[in-house]
């Protein structure tokens, strides 16, 4: 059962990226209700990712990258930026969500403009890391 979790994690990351993109497009088109649904969906899928990720690594430990040469540099560059920004994205997403739920639309868009690209980058690079660890170099 634990071995399937990296696949599930990648799906949650892809869903988060999809929901974030659709949420952004919705608000740009002034579809506020649709935006809210997509952004809440992104938050839920990211939360499920985090839970699944922690369960997997608690049980399976560290997964070592098997690539060599230039690919190691690329992988660890992506991984380090992903990890750093993931640590930032979590509290930023929570703050952005709280501001929206409290109706603080004077502040919500300002914070969301910073949160969205970071969150999208973390979701996308999460999928890239998964592919590099479990498919390209395994």
Image (cartoon, rainbow, N blue to C red):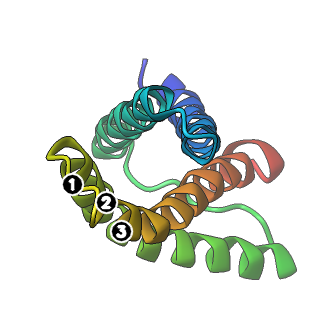
Task: Please identify the residue farthest to the left as the structure is shown.
Answer: 102
Identify residue for label 2.
108
Residue shown at the point (60%, 62%) measured from the top left: 121
**Depth order, front residue of 4/50:** 50
**Depth order, front residue of 85/110:** 110
Q: Position of residue 34 (x, y in %)?
A: 49, 26
The image quarter containing residue 62 is bottom left
Asked if the residue at tag 2 contacts the one at tag 3, i.e. Cβ–Cβ closer than 8 Å, the answer is yes
Q: Assess disc 2: are there few (<14), some (14-19) or many (≥20) residues with their C-alpha within 10 Å of its C-alpha.
A: some
- Left or right of residue 19, residue 92 in this image: left
Residue shown at the point (55%, 35%) measured from the top left: 19
Q: Quadrant of the N terminus?
A: top left
Q: Assess disc 1: are there few (<14), some (14-19) or many (≥20) residues with their C-alpha within 10 Å of its C-alpha.
A: some
Identify residue for label 1.
99
Badge 1 marks a residue whose secondary structure is helix
Q: Is residue 69 visible?
A: no
In the drawing, what numbered circle is on residue 118? none
Identify residue for label 3.
111
Q: Position of residue 44 (x, y in %)?
A: 35, 31
Residue shown at the point (52%, 39%) measured from the top left: 16
Measure how far apart labels 3 and 2 are at the Cα level. 5 Å
Residue shown at the point (65%, 47%) measured from the top left: 127
Looking at the image, residue 129 lies above or below residue 127: below
Q: Earlier in the sequence, mark 2 or mark 1?
A: 1
């Amino acid at each position: 059962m634990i071995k399937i979790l990296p696949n599930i994690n990648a799906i949650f990351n892809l869903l988060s990226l999809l929901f974030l993109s659709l949420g952004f497009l919705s608000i740009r088109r002034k579809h506020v209700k649709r935006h809210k649904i997509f952004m809440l969906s992104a938050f839920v899928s990211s939360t499920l990712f985090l839970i699944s990720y922690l369960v997997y690594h608690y049980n399976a430990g560290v997964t070592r990258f098997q690539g060599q040469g230039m690919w190691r540099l690329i992988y660890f560059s992506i991984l380090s930026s992903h990890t750093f920004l993931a640590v930032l994205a979590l509290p930023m997403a929570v703050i952005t969500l709280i501001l929206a739920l409290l109706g603080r639309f004077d502040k919500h868009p300002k914070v969301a403009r910073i949160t969205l690209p970071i969150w999208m980058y973390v979701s996308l690079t999460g999928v890239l890391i998964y592919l590099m660890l479990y498919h390209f170099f395994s």
